[in-house]
Image (cartoon, rainbow, N blue to C red):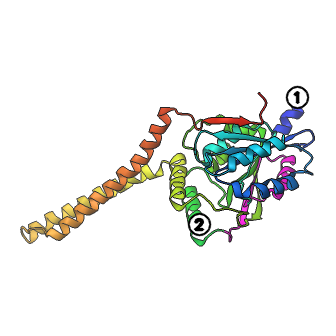
Amino acid sequence: MNQADNIAIAGLLPRSRAGKRLSLVVPMHNEAEVLGVFFQRIGEATKDLGVEVEIICVDDGSRDATLQGLIDRAGADPAVKVIALARNFGKEAAMTAGIEAAGGDMVVPIDADLQDPPELIAEFIRLWETGYDVVYGSRADRSSDTAMKRTSAHLFYRIFNRVSDLDIPESAGDFRLMDRAVVEALKRLPERNRFMKGLFAWVGFRQIGVPYVRPERAAGTTTMGYWRLWRFALDGITSFSTAPLRVWTGIGFAAAVLALIFAGGLIVRVLIVGREVPGYASMMVVLLLSFALQMIAIGVLGEYVGRLYQEVKGRPIYLVRARIGFDP
């Protein structure tokens, strides 16, 4: 590798898309209704990009006709490659499987519901050519989401960026273009509890956002309910911050100080007023409050211990049942 190559890798010289390959990574779970319009939009958005395109579709244990539709499409279009997971491992695992299988110089994770507009990929590549290693989509307008989802997402990003040493752009999702160097860095991260937005930010490199208006789903309904989003938020915070553990040290010290102040007050009161039998109601309030705080603290500790248990077992992030369209 000569000096010019090193300068180009540092992002100080522009890149060229000539002779490059673009890998689209599409995790899918029960997306049979949207397959037709998805491939039509993808074809229109990528035909004039001037790069070779491969579309890696990861079926994450779908229960509808998604896998069969993907197999049929792969038989008709050599650019389409299919990874069928052994069961539903979750979107983060499916995305990991696709990223690890991608062979392109540029890799773009994109959702099949077309809420991430594929027409934006052209702008991603243009900015990649100027030297950026990661170009992510920034949701300038989320009016297509429910008010509850918009509010919860805003709160999550604010809490995450406050308690973590890592900052995630509040309006960024998984939709982004990554240079090959970024993909290779991601492949070195072995954790089982994967919060991809955090991992994308953790690896660093030169990043820039492109704002876009998030549209409605092209078809079908989302499978991400509020309970799964809550678990996803817990995974994100506990994967990148120990603040929930450290905060209980502060609470313990504060409780100890209050207890000492209260004990001192009781001693003074007994010396001045005389012995007094404490009230049953106040005693029960203190006991119940102490019990509740202990249970919350144990619950927080349990979240970390549970994730540590998952990591220690060392099970694979996903298992593949079949690969269609890949070279032997």
Q: In front: 315, or 212?
A: 315
* The N terminus lies in quadrant: top right
Marks 2/1: CA–CA distance: 49 Å
Identify residue for label 1. Answer: 2
Would you place residue 266 above or below residue 208 in this image?
below
Q: Position of residue 281 (x, y in %)?
A: 18, 70
**Which range is magenta?**
115-144
Disc 1 packing (10 Å; few <14; some 14–19; many ≥20): few
Q: Secondary structure at mark 2?
A: helix
Residue 155: horizontal and vertical position, in percent?
55, 64
Amino acid on which the number 2 mark rests in the picture: Lys
Quadrant for residue 306, please give it. top left
Residue 130 is situated, as x and y percent measured from the top left of the image, at 87, 48
Please tell me in which quadrant of the rendered image residue 142 appears.
Answer: bottom right
Mark 1 is on which residue type?
Asn
| Number of numbered discs visible in the structure rendering | 2
Residue 261 shows up from this direction: no
Of residues 235 and 328, the one nearer the viewer is 328
Percent across and percent down for residue 229 are 55, 58
Image: 87 above or below 171: above
The residue tagged 2 is 149
